Image (cartoon, rainbow, N blue to C red):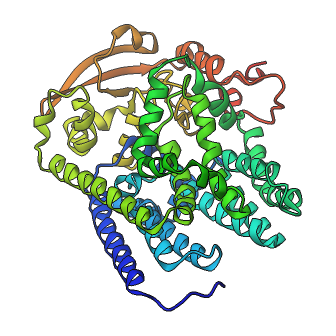
Amino acid sequence: MASHPLPTDDDARARRWFIAALAATLAFRAWLAWAIPMSGDEAYFIAWGKHPDLGFYDHPPMVGWWLAPLLAISDAPWVVRLPALLLPAALALLARGALLAWFGATRVQAELAGVLLVLAPLSVWNVLITTDTPLTLFAFASLALFARAAQSGRGALYLASGACLGLAFLSKYFAVLLAVSYFAWAAFSPDVRGRWRGLGLVLLAALPFGLLNAWWNYEACWSNVMFNAVNRHEGADLSWRTPALFMASIAYLFAPFAWYAWKRPGACITELFEPERRALHFAWLVPLAVFALLSPVRTIGLHWLQSFVPALVLGAALFLERGELERCVRWFAVVAALHAAAAAAVAAIPLERWRPVRIYDGMVYLVETQQLLRSLGPLAERYALAADGYSSAAVLSYHTRSEVPVFGPGSSHARHDDILTDWRKFAGRDVMILRKEAPARVDYTPYFRSIELRTVELRGATFHVVLGNGFDYAAYRSQVLATVRDRWYRIPGWLPIGRCYLCERYFPGTPCGR
């Protein structure tokens, strides 16, 4: 462990800044975790936690594994959000320790890096539990271990980095971008002995996790691969708006760092001469370069960048001078205060004041789900409840503590309901579909003996109910389920198929996509 001189007044001031920032952001985030209604994505992942498995439709299984023990305690929002709530604090504490013990940082650098990590924009307000939560933690652990291994050459550290990389891969496929940055590091590190051996050890340790995911996909229609590599990219086209949005996201997250890098380009290049610093910088430069290349045809979500923020902060803490770090802290503190003020203002505004907003019905749906369910009255006893989209179905499932299926073809996203729901069991039953938009009668008449359309008024929002009597499974199979199979389960011929739940259940003897 590196030795450090006795603390100075500057060290003590930086320490106070860290403690104050940590306490303030934890308190604010705890309030948000309690106050924000359960989102559709979170409710969807909670369904994973209720059915632990080696994989789920859209992503690898880690967030479901994290949620399973929490759900055994409670499904209250603040409980299931605990990992997301505590993530910035955990990253800050780990970063401080790594900077001091491994990378020769001063106490001021380490403390201010911790402040930056808890004050970074996403760290201030993002308390939602998603696949990015475990990804960010494991990616950071892998990177810190890899940078230390690059510095020391110790094989055990490369192996530990690879294991964490494998856990990150089981969280979200974006972990592949971190692996690409390791390849880039090895390719551009002629001064490091054993760099390819080290990379090989990383990949060796990560391989079992990748094989586990591949085996699950082989037995489950290759659903992760189909969603991430094929289905979600339907309709992608060139646009000037998506690169502009990507640049706005970069400015929002990284503005002060980008400013100092622009002012001192020569010093930035010098940073790449040290193996461990090269690893830290490549871990955010390479993914951002990939996203930049994709941005003309894809919208780069803000949350896509979350797992690469710690790498940039670690690199910046070692690169920037103390005064520059302090100015970055002040910038982030002002932005954090603006976020807190905005959140308080929104919370103080009555819900009805948002009626002119286009998404008002969706806001009422999330905030007043229980009241909406109560307004259905005795209909809920006679009819099986369903929704017309996956987010709505997940929210209803969360509040009813039961599985609410998606009626209709849905979209390419969040199709885990295809695994959970067996429409054969609904044959002849009465089904009630709750919708936010007005339904077209023709979309439902082919699948029921008769239908009735009703509306429910709640806080100025109108919700629509389709009452379907006598579900015709045969018609639904031939029109809806066949469309689902042909559109989203057309598995390429070069992928070997072990099993496919959708085709085995509804189309036995007919391989999907073949």
Question: Total of numbered circles in the picture?
Answer: 0
151 relative to 396 in the view: left or right: right
Q: Residue 39 is drawn in which quadrant?
A: top left
What is the x, y in percent for residue 332? 35, 57
Residue at position x 37%, y 20% in the image: 469
Asked if residue 171 shows in the view, the reply is no
Q: Residue 494 is drawn in which quadrant?
A: top right
Residue at position x 74%, y 19% in the image: 513
Position above or below: 141 against 291: below
In the image shown, does 191 or 345 lie closer to the viewer? 191
Residue at position x 75%, y 60% in the image: 162
Q: Residue 85 is drawn in which quadrant?
A: bottom left
Position above or below: 473 against 147: above
What is the x, y in percent for residue 156? 80, 72
Picture quarter with the N terminus: bottom right
Furthest toward the top, the residue is 442
Residue at position x 49%, y 27% in the image: 243
What is the x, y in percent for residue 291? 58, 35
Position above or below: 8 against 68: below
Position above or below: 308 against 106: above
In the image shown, does 38 or 83 lie closer to the viewer? 83
In the image shown, does 503 or 30 lie closer to the viewer? 30
Asked if residue 152 shows in the view, the reply is yes
What is the x, y in percent for residue 280? 64, 58
